[in-house]
Image: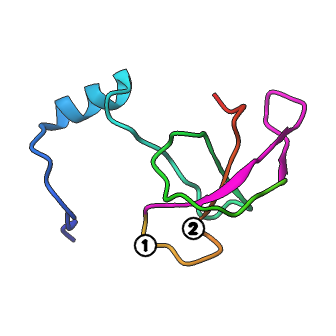
Amino acid sequence: MRRKRCHRIGLTKTQMIEGIINGTIASGVSDTGATSTAGKPGDPFASSKTKSTKTFRPPTGGTTTSTHQAELLLPVRAPANVVYVVPTLE
């Protein structure tokens, strides 16, 4: 089966990988099978004005709280497209 591309941006695969690694190209990973998706401020998500106080327990220990919600820029139905923005994520 052949994959369809939404748009071409004129970069080679190597240039794309280098840009993602050095941070000049924004990237993100979403586990749509997870209970909730957390993201950092400035990550490529659709903005939302919905406030949030959802608390996460990261693998590093302790807890951290989301400030607001955003949406994935993927064709995924709600509620799987909801991202909780957590300022303390690195």
Disc sitting over residue 18 in the figure: none
Instruction: Name which residue lies at 37% across and 25% down.
Output: 21
Q: Nearer the viewer, residue 54 or 18?
A: 54
Tell me what residue is drawn at x 18 percent, y 30 percent: 15
- Residue 45's x, y, as percent? 49, 54
**Viewer-proximal residue, 31 or 26?**
26
Please provide percent x and percent y for residue 18.
Answer: 27, 25
- Secondary structure beneath dot 2 equals loop
Residue 77 quadrant = bottom right
- Specify whether 23 is left or right of 29: left
Q: How is the image coloured?
A: rainbow
Give left or right: position of 58 versus 27.
right
Q: Label 1: which residue?
A: 75
Q: Quadrant of residue 49?
A: bottom right
The amino acid at mark 1 is: Pro
Sequence-earlier tag: 1 or 2: 1
Residue type beneath disc 2: Asn
